[in-house]
Structures are given as C-alpha cells and as structure tokens.
Image: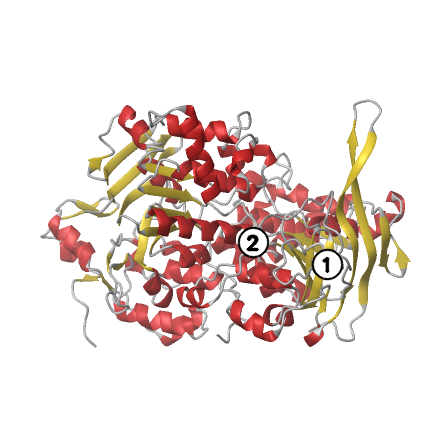
Amino acid sequence: MALLEVTDLKVHFRTDDGLVKAVDGVSYTVEAGQALGIVGESGSGKSVSSLTVMGLTRFAGNAEISGSIRFDGRDLLAASDEDMRRLRGNDMAMIFQDPLSSLHPFYKIGDQLVEAIQAHRDVSKAQALDRTVEMLGLVGIPEPRRRVDSYPHEFSGGMRQRVMIAMALINDPKLLIADEPTTALDVTVQAQILDLIQRLQRELDTAIVMITHDLGVVAEVTDEIGVMYAGRIVEYADKESIFAMPEHPYTWGLLKSIPRLDSPRGEELVPIAGRPPSLILKPPGCAFHPRCPYVREAHKRIDPQLAPAAEAGNGGGGRHEVACLLPGQTRRGLWAALQEGATPEVALQRVDVPDKVVDREAVGEVLAEPGTEVAEGVVATPENAAEVVPDVVAEEETS
Amino acid sequence: MSTNGANKLIEVRDLVKHFPLKKGIILQKQVGAVRAVDGVSFDVFEGETLGLVGESGCGKSTTARLVTRLLEPTDGEIIYKGSDIAHSSRAELKPMRRDMQMIFQDPYSSLNPRKTVGTIISEPFIIHRLEKDEAKRKKRVQELMDLVGLNPEHYNRFPHEFSGGQRQRIGVARAIALKPKLVVADEPVSALDVSIQAQIINLLSELQRDLGLTIIFIAHDLSVVRHVCDRIAVMYLGKIVELADADQLFEHPRHPYTGALLSAVPVPDPRLAREKQRQVLGGDVPSPTNPPAACRFHTRCPKAQDGTCNVVEPQLEVKQGGNLAACHFPLTDEEISKRVPTAAA
C-alpha cells in the first residue's frame, strides 16, 4: 500500500470575491522511499495541496476541503487536530522556502531542535541534545556540539536550510514535504542542499514530495513528476517520460520557455502567452485553453480529465497521464515539431489539429454521470450526450 | 560578438566601494569596512549586453549602482564620454542620467502604488523637462506602452491592477522612455514566474535590437545570462574572477569558480543530470569584511595549492581560449568536459 494516497483532493477558500478553487481535484500517490516532484507556477495550487496534506489548511475558517488523504493507512481528513499534531514533525515533516522566517529568532538552534524531539518523544533533555548534535552533524553543520548554542542569525542561508532539514528529519519521518527548499539560495548552495536531500533520502529511506517551479531541480532529485496548472495535475509521469515525451502543451511551454545551459545559445525562447488564470473565475473547458496555441472551439467547453498518455508505457516507465483534448497522434506530431526547433505557429502548419476532440474519459464521464454540466446551462444526459458534446468522438479515428 | 571594432561606451578602472562599519552610538568609530567592490575594471561596448554574475554578496549590484552613479565609489574611475564621472556632483550628473537607466528586480516595490501607469512612465519626461505639452506627452507614453506590449488604454490604471510580468513591462517602458544609451537591468526576471520570464527576456532583446541599447544584465541564473549576454563577467567577493565571451565562458570556463557555478546549475534533462559530474563547492562565501588573502577563492577552490594561491594574488590575464581569468591554475579542457553539460553532449 502506498505511503501517501491523495485522491480527488479539493481545497476551496471562500472569500469576499468568490470561491477560490486553489486545489481542484488532485490525485497522487507516494510510495515509501520514493521522491515525487510537483511542478507549477505561483497560484497553481502546489503549495496548498501539500499544506493540506500536513493538515495546515484546516484551521483556515474559510477552507472547504474534500476528497481523501490517506497516509500510512490513516484517513488524514478525518483525523482530529490532536492526531494531526502528533503526526506533524513526527511521521511527516515539512521544510519551507525561507529558512530565516521558519526558525525562531529568539531561541538557540539547539533548543529549537530539542523542543522538536521532546514534543513527540519522552526523552531527557540530555538525550535529545545528543540526538540534535548527531542530526546537525549528519546535515553537514561543522562542529555541531558547539553550534547548538548559536542563534539563527549567526548562520548563513544555506546553514539555516540545513538546520531546517535537520529539524524536519530529527524524528525519522516517513514523509518529507519540501516546498521550494532551494529557491531562496544561491546556486552553489542549492547544489549542496540538493545533494544533502538526495543522500539523506538514500540513507534514511524517507519519501519526499518536492514542490518547485524549477524543472532542473526535479530532474535531479525526483522519480516521478506531476505538473500542476490552475489547481489540477495536468500531466503526471516518471521523470524520463516527462522530459523525453511530454504530452501537455503547458509542459511543452515550460520546457521551451526556460533558457537551458545545454541548449544552443542562439535559440529563441518561446514564452507561454498570457498569464496564469484566476482561480475564482477559471476558464471554462480546459483551464489552459486561453494560453494554448493549439486551442480548438471544443476545448473551450469540455474539461479534460487525466487519462493515459499516448506514449504511456513506451518510455519503459509506469504511469504517464495527461489531461489534454488533443488526439494522441496530434500531440506526438506537435512535440516532434517543437523538438526540431519549430515555434508553435510553425508546428501548427506542419501538424493538422482536428476540431473534434478525442477524450474517452470526458465522454465516459458524461455517460457515467448523467447530469454533468458540459457548458453553461447545458446538462448532459446519456440521451443527449452526442448532441450537447458533438465535438467529442469516443474513439480515435485510425488514419 | 558585437564588440569587435565597437566603441567603448564606458570604461571602468580599479573601481572600489567600501561601506564603513561603525560602532558606538554618538561617537561613531569606524571599526572595519564591507569591501563590496574591491578593484574592478571592465569596458562596456556600445550595443552589447554585458552580464554580471555571481552569488549574493559578490558585489554585482553594487558595481551596477556605481556605474550608474547611484552610489559614489571609494576609489577608481568611471569614464563616460571621455570624462571621469566617479566623483561628479549631482548637477554634473543630471544630463548623464538621461543616458543611463535601471530596471529593478522587484516589479512590486519599484513602482509607486499611488501613481497611475501613465504618471509613472511620464515621470522621466517631467524630471528632464522634455515634452512639456501634456497631450504630446500622453501620446509618447502611450507609444511606449504599446512598444513594450502593454495596452495603451490602460494609461490610467494603477500598478496593482497588473500582473508581475506586466509590471515589469511598465518598469521597462519607464527605463527606455528617454531613449537611454545604457540600461542596467538588475535581476529583471528573478521575481517572475517561469512562463513569464521568457516574455521579458524576449522583450529586452527586441528593444535592444530596435533601439540599439547597451545593456548591463545582472543575474544569478546562469542559464538566463547565457541566453541574453554577449560577454560575461563572473564576480566573487568584490572582484572579477573571469571575463569572456558568452560562448567561450560556458563552453570553456577557465576559473575554477566559474566551473563550479556552471556545474551547480540543475539541468532539466534526467539523462544529462546522470552523466555530468556535479562538483559541489563546500562551505559558504567568506565575509566581505575580512576576505581571504591573495586569491579570495582559495579557501573553497578544489585546485588551490598551498604556498601559491594563499600567498600571491592572481591578476586578471588572458588564458587559453582568450578568457580573462584571475587564476594560477586555470581549468583545462579535459576537466571541463567532465563537468559542464553542453549542447554537444
């Protein structure tokens, strides 16, 4: 059984402006000792979904949380606040982007770590201090016996992040959630911290959920990757597949819009047009459609679900799913063109994008759940399915 | 490269900036100095993009603020149009300010939230008493907004009504309003989402092409710097340790610090990530109040040799391939091929 199983998680916040759908149906699993990367831009819901796993959004009075989170056999959404408190920092721990604001400036490093142990274990202060020194040594703090008496401001940014990692791992958690752990750090320090996280994962067999906007970081650290957009995972695959054969236009956009050290220097960057959508007024249909260069009319009405990718299994990997209404062959053709350096406009000249969408899942959903609203005021039933979603064909036409 | 035969726009010689550290409340005694920039020399050629890279605290932003004379240097020369502006007065600097503009990192704090976009972009015209006719000024501002990809109809909107990427466009419009010769961009894309970064990078290169701008581009993200810059200076603890053409610097870095920086960048390709040997520098950057003697990098350098690197300070001189590097034991091609991911690999 998976260590962490998140199923159809939704976290909506009621605000004066409307309902903010920060997380809108996210599912993933993490096995013991595995590393999952969640990639997305600000406002994609990547942090909120992880905070919810840690039980940190339940105190927000305006949050509506639904779905299920199972951790180590337990239902976390049903767990009491007291149970969650016992789990946090013990079986599951989290490190944050900014290590300075995550450490208390008033207390010595050692005292803060000792407190983290004594909150969960019935041990003497001396024992806890020994464990603290051992852990600080493990994360590479020189002279840990002496440094336990230091205050956070006496440490550099990289050292503070090491302290945060030591604190997170001090009770041998089964799961570590790292939310942009290296974003605030310089590149050489980032390399140190990524090395440390990988080494500790191997040695301590901790499962890791790494949240980041940096595709380079996930390529180096994680096994599987979920790309989030507007509160959903739009593509999920093992890391080999997602870099070799990405199938979602947003993933293509991310890969083609970043300058890379290993790409030819003169190559022009292809930005993703527009900007991330409002989570209150999400675009209808595919949430990415206002920014998608390959959009067709039907995409503005039909909301694609995650479904097996066209190339699933071909990469030798496991799960590869994508939430896109383009037919598999079209996706393969477009990505091949982009790989050859074509811009989206040129790719569109080479590959014909059909107006009809192929989405078995979408059709399936309409048929399975009579009453699905497919457009404003239009409710689908099995009888009228063919009529109200006329652009959907259930099977890919063989060519 | 665009520098061949091009004229020098600015010459910087032995530039030094020390910030005094003081102790005491009433009678302040100077007890030391942060040696933020400590003897930096370089030329900026017309029409090029010069990159300044390095980790936080290396002095790259201070250097930029010295060149634009937002700070007064402790020592050294900044030669612009044949005269040294290092210690010029405010009045003397005023005509020159038109030619040098800055774009800042944080588009949220670098725009006055109480002023409309139109007012913000009009400001340079008002300060320099140009385009006094209001209708004409408005037209100029709207042309600028159009040029940087903003809707001119949004003239009367406030900064909070714009996204991060659009705000950075406002900052760009303000910087190019007076057709400056030099634009100093200090981490212009670091605060933006990845999908937006490319929009601003492309905008800057288009404007450079169309307006013939010279750009000093400061960034810590080496991939971005490689993409936009013609020449790159790598800084460490207030000194330039390597200066070379972009291609040369990335394919054949000579200074071990440049090599370490390049190998530290995560590559978004699992195959290359496995193949390359990541070289992780130990420790942290030493304090600029008390930098290591001789070569400042010797405390962290994998190639440092006792008796040389900690005794004799290396000078910035031409190494194999034409790079200027300040190092006694520069990297060889063989060492580089193992560590640095390239397009050819």
| Residue B252 placement (x, y as % from top left) | 62, 72
- Label tally: 2
- Residue B178, compared with residue A174, is above or below; it is below
Residue positioned most to the top: B26
* Residue A109 - label: none
Write down the residue under mark 2. Answer: A188
Q: Which mark is residue B240?
A: 1
Vertical side of B44 occupied by B155: above or below: above
Asked if both marks, 2 and 1, belong to the same chain, the answer given is no
Q: Distance between the residues labelled 2 and 1?
A: 18 Å
Q: Is mark 1 on a helix, strand or loop?
A: strand
**Residue at the limit of the structure toward the left, as seen here:** A383
Name the chain letter of the residue that bears numbered label 2.
A
Nearest to the observer: residue A183 or residue B151: A183
Quarter occupied by the N terminus of chain B: bottom right
Query: Residue B278: percent from the left, percent from the top?
Result: 50, 61
Amino acid under disc 2: Thr
Q: What element carries label 2?
A: helix
Identify the amino acid type marked 1: Ile
Q: Which residue is pictured at 60% across the width and 44% down the height?
A: B106
